[in-house]
Image: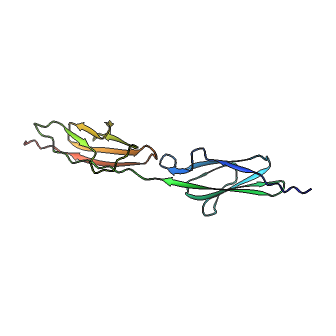
Amino acid sequence: SEDTIPPVGSLTLPQGSELDCFRPELRLVGRSGLAAVDYEWLGPRGEVLGTRREATTATTGLHQLMVTSRRNGCRDTLSFDITEDFTSPTAFIATTEPLTCLRDSVVLRVRADSPTSPFYRYRWLSPTEEILGEGPSRTVFSVGTYQLVTQNIRNGCRDTTSIFVDANQTE
């Protein structure tokens, strides 16, 4: 009898199927119940990503894994979609009054009209880029340019904005 049994392929996406700032490249792992098989990974434009059991991709869209039996040439093709989320968070710093002889500190705050999310983490940096702390506000005591680094903890993407704290020693 003729051998026409195709291999049964399977694939694993150990990091999930979404590219993001944490995972700008994904590892792809193919498997088959047969030992004598060839693997071929294709990207969304038909480009060959690899011919081994494992491959990587940094491209979104419909991908394919073809598992071909070396014994009979029969093939199993699996299709899977890779998506992306590279959306950076956005935050603005509210303007402050200058430091004066009577006002030796000011509170830097995320502006009220900034988009918010429970997945945003705020980190404040000093003019020398030392970490001052985390949270939506920070009290500062000296002149200089302060940075607010906002990170979306779901996808790892960041945005940085800054504000200059000035002094008016005539007040």
Q: Residue at x 92, y 56 (%)?
A: 1
Residue 26 percent across, percent down from the top left: 57, 49
> Front-most of 57 and 18?
18
Among the 4 quarters of the image, the one containing residue 134:
top left
Where residue 8 appears, as percent x and y from the top left, is 75, 51
In this picture, residue 86 sits left or right of residue 44: left
- Residue 47 vertical placement versus 111 (above, below): below
In terms of depth relative to the viewer, which is nearer, 123 or 13? 13
> On the picture, is 43 further left or further right than 89?
right
Position of 133 with respect to 20 (left or right) is: left
- Which residue is depicted at the point 19% across and 45% down? 96
Residue at 33% x, 50% y is: 115
User: Depth check: 131 or 91 in front?
Assistant: 91
- Give percent across and percent down for residue 65: 68, 55
Residue 24 visible in the snapshot:
no
Q: How is the image coloured?
A: rainbow
User: How many discs appear?
Assistant: 0
Q: Residue furthest bottom?
A: 45
Figure check: 68 above or below 154: below
Image spot of residue 107 (x, y percent): 22, 40
Quick one: which residue is furthest to the right in this view? Answer: 1
Query: Is residue 86 shown to the viewer in this render?
Result: yes
**Does 155 sit left or right of 67 as displayed?**
left
Say which quadrant the C terminus sits in. Answer: top left
Q: Residue at x 59, y 56 (%)?
A: 81
